[in-house]
Image: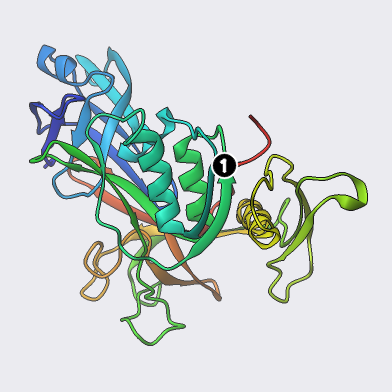
Amino acid sequence: MSMELYIYSPDIELQGVIDGYSSLRWRRRYFEPGEFELHCKAPAENIAMLQEGSIIHRVDRKEAGIIEGVTIAAADTGGDEITATGRMGSSMLDRRIITPTINFSGKVEDAMRKAVSDNAITARPLPHLILGTAAGLTPTCSFQATGKTVLAVCEALGKAAPLGFRVRLDVPNKQWIFEVYGGTDHSVVQTVNPWVVFSGENQNINNPSYMRDSTGCANYAYVAGEGEGSARVIVEVDRAGGEPRRELWVDARDLQKGDLSDDDYKAQLTQRGLEKLAEARKSESFSADAVDTGNFAYRADWDLGDIVSFEKWGIRIDERITEVEEVDEGSVVTVTPTCGSPLPETLDLGDDV
């Protein structure tokens, strides 16, 4: 039986409820907005509700989706079908750019909150968006940004930290709430929290898949800032960790020293190097259809952002769950976590403007 989907207008006014659909794909992501795809019958009331900009809310999830695309067509089973696609609430941060320039040194969580507040709340506010309560997360950064979208900045900072972020829907108060969060370490290499191990032996996975790809990866960056020739400021960022060194050149001439001290400027160049190395890291991931058992229940014992262990084919990785895809086809619900780093998508905080 399908769950109820509450449909709201862009102003967070309830438009109606959809309690019958042929399929719903709900993909949650830790470092970037997730996405969704809904297929349902196309009576007039569904067509009226499922409009571009409308909000799809599941009361059992912290994320809510914003419809970006709608298709109506004849269904293979007869009648008409409407397909609504879009991304989760944090995608709205793609609508604002960083201007004027941000120079920041401090906690990554505070940096993300400043980027959002200065460019999407205090100035050029996005409707209904507020900052949530700070979680007090400890990773730090030093960065400068101009002209990039707020979303791109949060994604790059989050991947380098690593920290996740979301924009959560608060229906009673008609607000979108920006939050930064971190997961819990449930891997076998720690002793504080209960272990979560996805493996054939534990009978909690189906259809496992493992991927490893070092194409274009790098672990040592030379980051070049302002100046010319021998006077150019260059810092080296080493993330090799004992592995064979693979070098990367990062042109960060867009970062200007201005009134910064030498140490603060080099810290910003180092942050740029960390971000570029996060993009260029070796791709390694495990994914599988998760089977809830007494010890490993989704959202009770493990969730998006947690660090867990995957074991199969004599391979074990202890990595963060960066994506969870839920597919609901009425009688069958499949939950597929991806642990580790899939093939990277390019994120860039430099070189334009």
Q: Position of residue 251 (x, y in %)?
A: 76, 44
User: Identity of the amino acid at label 1?
Assistant: Ala
| Residue furthest out toward the front | 259
Asked if one can make out residue 185 in the rendered structure from this viewpoint, the answer is yes
How many labels, in total?
Answer: 1
Q: Which residue is mark 1?
A: 145
Relative to 306, is 273 above or below?
above
Structural crowding at the residue carrying mark 1, measured as other residues with C-alpha within 10 Å and reported as few (<14), some (14–19) or many (≥20): many
Relative to 54, is 309 above or below?
below
Q: Residue at x 38, y 61 (%)?
A: 305
Q: If the image is split into quadrants, where does the N terminus sit? A: top left
Frontmost residue, 292 versus 86: 86
**Tag 1, which secondary structure?**
strand
Q: Residue at x 58, y 46 (%)?
A: 144
Relative to 71, is 145 above or below?
below
Q: Position of residue 121 (x, y in %)?
A: 31, 36
Frontmost residue, 322 versus 101: 101
Q: Is residue 140 shown left or right of residue 81? A: right
Q: If the image is split into quadrants, where does the C terminus sit? A: top right
| Residue 34, quarter of picture | top left
Q: Is residue 34 shown left or right of residue 245? A: left
Frontmost residue, 59 versus 158: 158
Relative to 142, is 20 above or below?
above
Q: How is the image coloured?
A: rainbow
Q: Position of residue 278 (x, y in %)?
A: 60, 56
Q: Residue at x 54, y 35 (%)?
A: 148
Q: Position of residue 258 (x, y in %)?
A: 67, 45
Q: Is residue 252 shown left or right of residue 303? A: right
Asked if one can make out residue 209 in the rendered structure from this viewpoint, the answer is no
